[in-house]
């Protein structure tokens, strides 16, 4: 039986500070695997605008928040970043989030979580970025921007910037259980035992004092 060893990079902390490294790792791995399409989650558009600069030769699809995410008739993506992404040949996808929409309205009105948000919370056990890479793959497939039989590189983050990249085989939202996270390129893992934590240093100091 064949096996494959692939590297996963773990960041000690999540957040914007990992953006550049995440883009570099995603670009290098996409080229190694012969992938041509990269989905990038972006809110204001900063990550999307940077991605079109770094990921040269790739088809970039910047996936934004839906219109009205924070307030009616508003869009988080700034006009400047939209222009930068499109000028560099990137495409922009703005549509209902796969794990939100009508069911989120039920939760906000009645206080009852629905299945889509339960799925989202389950994916978050692997980090916020895992939920997002799966979600944007579903959204892009539903919009007809990616095929469901060709893996793509997905880039996401924990609030702002990027800190996770994964190879994902997309599917449509109504067949969500067919989505496949093929490979994790990088992700934050603050609890990883290889990282020394303050509590570890405190324990070490106590032992030294004995």
Image (cartoon, grey):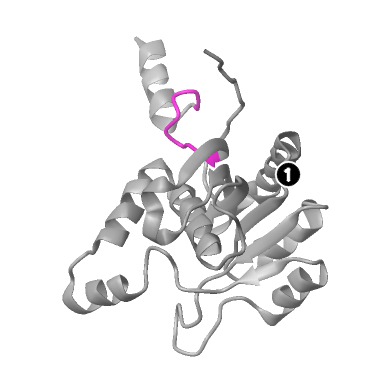
Whether residue 98 is visible, yes or no, is yes
| Residue of label 1 | 27
Q: Is residue 192 magenta?
A: yes
Q: Residue at x 65, y 78 (%)?
A: 78
Q: Nearer the viewer, residue 11 or 144?
A: 144
Where does residue 13 sit, x and y in percent of width and height? Answer: 52, 42
Whether residue 159 is visible, yes or no, is no
Name above or below for residue 75 compared with residue 199. below
The quadrant the C terminus occupies is top left
Where does residue 143 sit, x and y in percent of width and height? Answer: 55, 68
State the SS at label 1.
helix
**Residue 127 appears left or right of 16:** left
Which residue is at the far bottom?
A: 73
Q: Nearer the viewer, residue 172 or 139?
A: 172
Name above or below for residue 61 compared with residue 209. below
Where does residue 171 sit, x and y in percent of width and height? Answer: 48, 53
Q: Is residue 210 magenta?
A: no
Q: Quadrant of residue 175?
A: bottom left
Q: Main secondary structure of the magenta part?
A: loop
**Residue 181 appears left or right of 30:** left
Identify the magenta region. Answer: 187-195
Q: Quadrant of residue 99?
A: bottom left
Q: Nearer the viewer, residue 15 or 49?
A: 49
Where does residue 174 sit, x and y in percent of width and height? Answer: 38, 60
Total labels: the figure holds 1
Q: Residue at x 59, y 20 (%)?
A: 5
């Amino acid at each position: 039986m064949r096996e494959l060893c692939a590297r996963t990079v773990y960041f000690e902390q999540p957040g914007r500070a990992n953006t550049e490294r995440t883009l570099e790792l995603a670009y290098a791995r996409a080229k190694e695997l012969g992938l041509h399409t990269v989905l990038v989650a972006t809110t204001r558009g900063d990550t999307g605008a940077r991605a079109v600069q770094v990921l040269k030769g790739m088809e970039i699809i910047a996936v934004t928040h839906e219109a009205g995410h924070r307030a009616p008739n508003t869009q988080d993506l700034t006009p400047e970043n939209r222009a930068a992404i499109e000028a560099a040949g990137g495409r922009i996808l703005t549509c209902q989030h796969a794990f939100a929409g009508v069911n989120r309205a039920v939760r906000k009105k009645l206080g009852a979580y629905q299945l889509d948000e339960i799925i989202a919370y389950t994916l978050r056990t692997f980090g916020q970025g895992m939920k997002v890479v799966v979600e944007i793959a579903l959204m892009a497939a539903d919009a007809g921007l990616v095929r469901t039989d060709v893996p793509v590189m997905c880039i996401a983050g924990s609030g702002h910037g990027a800190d996770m990249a994964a190879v994902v085989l997309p599917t449509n939202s109504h067949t969500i259980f067919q989505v496949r996270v093929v490979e994790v390129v990088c992700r934050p893992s603050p609890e990883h035992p290889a990282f020394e934590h303050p509590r570890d240093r405190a324990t070490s100091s106590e032992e030294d004092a004995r």
